[in-house]
Amino acid sequence: MDEDLEKLISAAIDDEEQELALIETRTDQLERQLIWLVLGVCLAALAASILAGFLLSRALTRPIAALISGARAIGEGDLGHRISYDRRDEFADLAAQFNVTAARLESQREQLLGIQSGLEDEVQRRTHQLEDANGRLKRLDEMRMLFLADIGHELRTPLTVLRGEAEVSLRGAKTVAEHRETLEHIVRLTGQMARLIEDLLFLSRAEVGAVRFEMQPVALQDVLDIAIAEGRVLASANDLLLHAVLPPEPCTVQADPERLVQALLIGIDNAVKYSDAGGTIEVALVCGAPNATITMRNPGPDIPAADLPFVFNRFYRGARQAADRVTSGSGLGLPIAKWVVDTHGGDVTIDSRDHETVLTITLPTAA
């Protein structure tokens, strides 16, 4: 029994050892499989991590690079730069805010540039105005100096003659008739000086706007009748005829009749001074829309072409005027006439050829 029992126990032990070996074999197989599985999972996890990191890096790099590029462009002054980003995430909001900020900066820069351009234009305009004003002041100063010099010359000449007449009269014994002739000459000279001073005062008041015009509808025929009536007195004293050619229909203008008569008389007076003895002065009126034209023709020495551009300048005397500056006029008549006509919105011109001088005054007709 002991031997049988020992055999049974040995057999049982062998069975257990075989089963244990089998279990160990299966355990080793499972361990190896588990190791490979863990390695596979780790490798898969590593690959997934690398891929996710690459994708995340790529997803972050593009918007960050765009933001860096945009910031660099803005820093360099390219305010028109915008970030293009079509995804819906936080970077999209950041890119949109960046674009809004850039647009505001660009708008503000354009406004500033516009203001700067406006300021530059204003500075240039003001500079031109100052230059023009400075130029006008210089010209006015030159004109003032010339004006004062001309006034001094104009007044010195008759004063010298007056003094000479008085000294000659005092030095010698003269008859009553001779003294009377001297006094008459002195009266003429003082009258010329008074007219000169009156013209100077008129021009001075005109320059400062102290001469007022009472504008009203006026028939030019009525104004010309007054001027021609006084002009005929001047013409007859110089053995001249004054012929008027006026249309029968009223020619109405908006004017100050007193000032207009003054300008017309200046023209007639000049025509009388420089007409040939025994000649005829013609004053004609042509009325039409939009202007009325008054012409004064007188036969006499031509005004040299070189003098024509300056006949309306103050104190200007051309070559045709006599050497005696006292009897040839003050040189203020035509400037006054031109100023009066210009104030009425008209124009005055003078032409001289073929032994005839024509003064033309153009005035706008009233509706």
Image: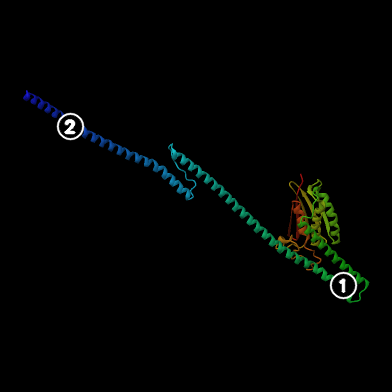
How many callouts does the rendering have? 2
Question: Which label lies toward us, 1 or 2?
Answer: 2
What residue is at 43 percent from the left and 46 percent from the top? 68
Q: Position of residue 115 (x, y in %)?
A: 58, 49
* Label 1: element kind: helix
Circle 2 residue: 24
- In front here: 73 or 194? 73
- Tell me if residue 203 comes above or below residue 176 in the rendering: above
Q: Quadrant of the N terminus?
A: top left
Kind of residue indicated by mark 1: Ala
Q: Position of residue 308 (x, y in %)?
A: 72, 61
- Tell me if residue 81 comes above or below residue 337 in the rendering: above
- Tell me if residue 94 comes above or below residue 279 in the rendering: above
Circle 1 residue: 166
What residue is at 86 percent from the left and 61 percent from the top? 237
What residue is at 30 percent from the left and 39 percent from the top? 46
